[in-house]
Image: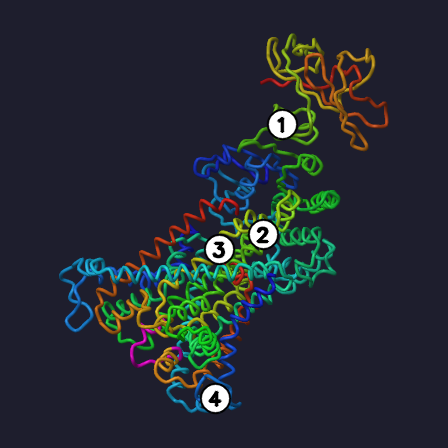
């Protein structure tokens, strides 16, 4: 009986996406009936300069923000686990625990009222770093928690200085988690809509923002095509991340 | 001069006093054991020697040098942890060579000493394996090899045998003794298993609630426990309420509550009128039908018998209501529950404990 | 002493960054809610403070109504997600191929959030199969045709769709740790299948249920994209309201006040959840 229910739920989860992917190859403007197979929409996609610019922006932002977030998040994860740094833990997880709207809105106010910052690349990257730190910290912390604490004491006992302990023991042991965190941060940034919506301003479209405006104005199966490609990319990244740090995915707290 | 000295060491955690004014001297080349129940402070003491924590009061001296300013990584003291703490991402060889690598030892020297250590610990064929591929006993040897490779002045072992099963434990105990006698490095060993302590050590320090109860060689500790706690903790012992009647040069005459008078070994500290305990080990008590050749004997009824293969432990109820534990080899006569018997012991067996 | 400066060395920089980018903006929002709106939108100078925005909020019931609707929508989504996810999580937790099955649940998350909404636009659209069949049946029964898209139904189903994996994951993580011996013992002592579930499995799974509920309820409270794209004109939720203040009406103080109210709502529910998990959770 459970099996039937499970199948139903899986079908529910995958049907919409299958439809999107399927219709990206559909030889028709309307997403209603299947008329024939075509690569047409992918060709349109490749010539759509607006879309390509948005994609390029998204990738650049994702790269920059994920690298910074990984660095800061790893430091945070180590600090929280080893020194029980509660304040840092709460601050890092707040963007994760709160509705995105709140972070987006408060950052908008902060940028415009206090920093007098023109909304653009910088404002987006900073915002993405902010919500990604928490995710990386959680992954790194989970990896550290799975290790025997005595390992670090043993290293010291056998003559290793703090730096040597980090370099030969801590770093190799958390590296898979750090990479997994980096991939997750990259994916989160690439996919983010709400926070980017508030902090992007006019000059810098990202892929999700561009898709949003397409959905609101003129929907063509080109949206399906870009969705399919985007799905492939993030899928690969998530699978890689799951391989490198399986514990982080299992124990959410 | 002793090699490792603790002077008036005190360590507190908030309101709890983990170590209370402890002073201790350990000789070079000694196998010294800290024995006590959990919470007695033995592991804390070990950590203070290793340098992971600092004493709130008192000093720790190694070869006359105060260790106060020296951090753990610089102390010539190494630890074998209870969980072994082998680095999972390094091979056996890399684990063992780790201390040499941290000390920036020259490559040839490192390889030579590594090879020697692998042979000594019989790990040569496992050199390229990872810790998770090893058995419990093998991990133990890797942990030992790693801690000994750069010849520390003192080796600390924190309940290192706790994770091994009984048979393996005995084998490792023998190995440890041989290793220590051979290398002549001072071992400070922490355990709560008193049989282990008795088997391995040159001297034992019995600890309880942050204080030293008695420091002595195993035989003396067993035969002449200084107080009730030590008597009770090290091995099994019978305790009967007693009062001193006469204390002379050659013997002590005690009155056992509800039973009568007995003759006990001489005790310098005993004086007429003192209240205390007469303590006697189960193997020192005999059971028989008459036992008139012994000066101390009483009637009793066998309550139960615990068969243990080579020996049996009998519980005999005396007239006063007290229960006496008696250890007898099964090769002799066997007694059954409900049987009336006489129990007795020699006039030079047991001892009087005052308090 | 050594530990203290190491703590600040590793944790200091992220802390400063987060104080700057999370705590400070939060404070700014709070103060913004207490100011007057500027002449051309935005905020007036920081001279006078006022509670005008809050009076405005509580004055007109329509705003409280939208809050209530959002809470109800979030509750409904959470409940449906829980009912849908529980049997699935149980199955995965007890299966030998749990790793594969759980990855299959995570995979849909790899698609962009907007794409998942867009997919429902297709599926619920008037020309899609579902709509046509439904209306055909209704026609046979003599009822008026319904529009699936741009309705609360569309919003709800999309909300469930987007958040379902977030209910499955923590639930699965919890169920996986259950000791099967407990159920065997219960059966041995005479409990039937329903009793075993209700008295053993479910209470033990509470921490997982609460985690999952939090991961669904709280984000849904702040959603605006789904109601905007899939909802009708009357289906506005708090998120839409806030977004409007900042982008359309440019009444920032009011938008800030709404954000503050939303934050308070989230905090209240979080504390409630923490309370429940503490009192009921001495099984763990």
Front position among marks 4 and 3: 3
Give the CA separation, mark 4 to mark 1: 85 Å
Please provide percent x and percent y for residue B242. Answer: 64, 13
Disc 2/disc 1 C-alpha distance (Å):
44 Å
Question: Tag 3, which chain?
Answer: C
Specify the quadrant of the image occupied by residue B127.
bottom right
Q: How crowded is mark 4: few (under 14 residues within 10 Å), some or many (20 or more)?
A: many
Q: Residue A99: x, y in percent? A: 36, 63
Share a chain, discs 3 and 2? yes
Pointer 2: residues within 10 angstroms few (<14), some, or many (20+)?
some
- Observer-side mark, 2 or 1, equals 2
Q: Mark number for residue C178?
A: 2
Instruction: Check residue B230 in the rendering and tell me which mark sits there, or answer none.
Output: 1
The chain containing the residue under callout 1 comes to: B
Tell me how far mark 3 sits from mark 1, CA to CA: 52 Å
State the residue at coordinates (73%, 54%). B120
What whole-number distance in Å separates the C-alpha atoms at marks 3 and 2?
Answer: 14 Å
Question: Looking at the rendered structure, which numbered label has been put on residue C71?
Answer: none
Residue labelled with disc 4: A42
Could one spot residue A165 in this view of the protein?
Answer: no
The residue depicted at 16 percent of the width and 67 percent of the height is C44
Q: Mark 2 lies on which chain?
A: C
What is the spatial separation of the Cα atoms under label 4 and label 2, in whole angstroms? 48 Å
Indicate whether residue B35 is drawn in magenta: no
Q: Which mark lies nearer to you, 4 or 1?
A: 4
* Label 3 Cα neighbours within 10 Å, binned few <14 / some 14-19 / many ≥20: many
Which residues make up the magenta segment? Answer: A194-208
Residue B159 located left or right of residue C52: right
């Amino acid at each position: 009986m459970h099996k039937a229910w499970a199948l139903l739920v899986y079908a529910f989860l995958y049907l919409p996406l299958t439809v999107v992917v399927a219709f990206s190859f559909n030889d028709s403007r309307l997403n209603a009936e299947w008329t024939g197979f075509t690569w047409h929409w992918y060709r349109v996609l490749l010539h759509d300069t607006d879309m390509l610019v948005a994609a390029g922006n998204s990738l650049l932002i994702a790269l920059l923000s994920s690298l910074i977030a990984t660095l800061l998040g790893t430091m945070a994860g180590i600090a929280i686990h080893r020194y029980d740094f509660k304040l840092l833990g709460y601050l890092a997880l707040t963007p994760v625990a709160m509705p995105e709207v709140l972070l987006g809105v408060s950052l908008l106010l902060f940028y415009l009222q206090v920093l007098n910052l023109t909304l653009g690349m910088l404002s987006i990257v900073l915002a993405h770093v902010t919500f990604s730190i928490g995710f990386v910290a959680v992954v790194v912390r989970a990896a550290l928690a799975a290790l025997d604490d005595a390992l670090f004491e043993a290293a010291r006992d056998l003559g290793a200085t703090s730096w040597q302990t980090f370099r030969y023991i801590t770093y190799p042991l958390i590296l898979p988690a750090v990479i997994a965190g980096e991939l997750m941060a990259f994916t989160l940034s690439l996919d983010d809509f709400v926070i980017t919506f508030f902090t992007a301003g006019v000059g810098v479209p990202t892929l999700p923002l561009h898709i949003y405006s397409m959905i609101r104005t003129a929907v063509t199966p080109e949206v399906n095509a870009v969705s399919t490609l985007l799905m492939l990319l993030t899928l690969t990244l998530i699978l890689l991340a799951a391989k490198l740090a399986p514990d982080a995915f299992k124990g959410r707290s | 001069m002793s090699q490792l000295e603790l002077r008036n060491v005190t360590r507190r955690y908030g309101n709890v006093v983990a170590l209370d004014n402890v002073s201790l001297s350990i000789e070079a080349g000694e196998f010294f054991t800290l024995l006590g129940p959990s919470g007695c402070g033995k592991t804390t003491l070990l950590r203070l020697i290793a340098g992971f924590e600092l004493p709130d009061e008192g000093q720790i001296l190694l070869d006359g040098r105060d260790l106060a300013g020296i951090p753990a990584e610089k102390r010539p003291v190494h630890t074998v942890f209870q969980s072994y703490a082998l680095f999972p991402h390094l091979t056996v060889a890399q684990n063992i060579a780790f201390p040499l690598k941290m000390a920036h030892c020259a490559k040839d020297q490192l390889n030579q000493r590594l090879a020697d250590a692998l042979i000594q610990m019989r790990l040569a064929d496992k050199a390229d394996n990872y810790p998770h591929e090893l058995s419990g006993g093998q991990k133990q040897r890797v942990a030992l090899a790693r801690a000994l490779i750069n010849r520390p002045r003192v080796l600390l072992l924190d309940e290192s045998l706790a994770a091994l099963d009984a048979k393996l434990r005995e084998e490792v105990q023998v190995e440890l003794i041989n290793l220590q006698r051979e290398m002549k490095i001072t071992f400070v060993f922490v355990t709560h298993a008193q049989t282990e302590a008795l088997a391995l050590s040159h001297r034992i320090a019995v600890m309880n609630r942050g204080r030293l109860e008695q420091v002595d060689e195993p035989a003396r500790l067993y035969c002449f426990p200084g107080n009730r706690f030590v008597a009770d903790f090290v091995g099994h012992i019978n305790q009967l309420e007693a009062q001193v009647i006469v204390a002379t040069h050659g013997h002590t005459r005690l009155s056992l509550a509800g039973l009568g008078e007995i003759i006990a070994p001489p005790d310098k500290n005993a004086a007429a009128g003192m209240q205390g305990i007469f303590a006697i080990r189960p193997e020192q008590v005999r059971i028989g039908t008459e036992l008139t050749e012994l000066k101390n004997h009483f009637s009793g009824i066998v309550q139960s018998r615990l068969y243990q293969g080579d020996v049996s432990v009998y519980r005999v109820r005396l007239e006063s209501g007290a229960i006496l534990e008696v250890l007898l080899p099964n090769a002799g006569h066997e007694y059954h529950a409900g049987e009336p018997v006489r129990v007795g012991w020699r006039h030079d067996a047991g001892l009087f404990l005052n308090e | 002493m050594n530990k203290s400066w190491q703590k600040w060395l590793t944790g200091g920089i992220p802390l400063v960054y987060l104080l700057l980018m999370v705590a400070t903006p939060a404070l700014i929002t709070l103060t913004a809610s207490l100011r007057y709106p500027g002449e051309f939108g935005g905020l007036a100078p920081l001279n006078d403070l006022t509670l005008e925005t809050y009076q405005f909020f509580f004055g007109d019931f329509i705003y409280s109504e939208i809050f209530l609707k959002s809470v109800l929508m979030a509750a409904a989504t959470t409940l449906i997600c829980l009912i849908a996810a529980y049997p699935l999580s149980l199955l995965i937790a007890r299966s030998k191929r749990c790793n594969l099955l759980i990855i299959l649940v995570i995979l849909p998350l790899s698609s962009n959030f907007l794409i998942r909404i867009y997919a429902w636009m297709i599926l619920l659209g008037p020309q899609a199969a579902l709509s046509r069949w439904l209306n055909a049946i209704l026609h046979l029964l003599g009822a008026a045709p319904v529009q699936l898209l741009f309705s609360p139904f569309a919003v709800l189903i999309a909300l469930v769709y987007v958040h379902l994996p977030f209910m499955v994951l923590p639930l699965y993580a919890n169920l996986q740790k259950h000791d099967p011996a407990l159920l065997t013992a219960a059966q041995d002592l005479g409990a039937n299948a329903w009793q075993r579930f209700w008295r053993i499995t479910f209470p033990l799974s509470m921490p997982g249920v609460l985690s999952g509920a939090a991961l669904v309820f709280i984000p849904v409270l702040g959603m605006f994209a789904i109601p905007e794209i899939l909802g009708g004109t009357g289906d506005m939720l708090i998120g839409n309201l806030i977004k409007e203040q900042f982008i359309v009406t440019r009444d920032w103080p009011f938008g800030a006040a709404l954000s503050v109210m939303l934050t308070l709502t989230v905090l209240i529910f979080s504390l409630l959840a923490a309370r429940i998990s503490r009192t009921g959770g001495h099984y763990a």
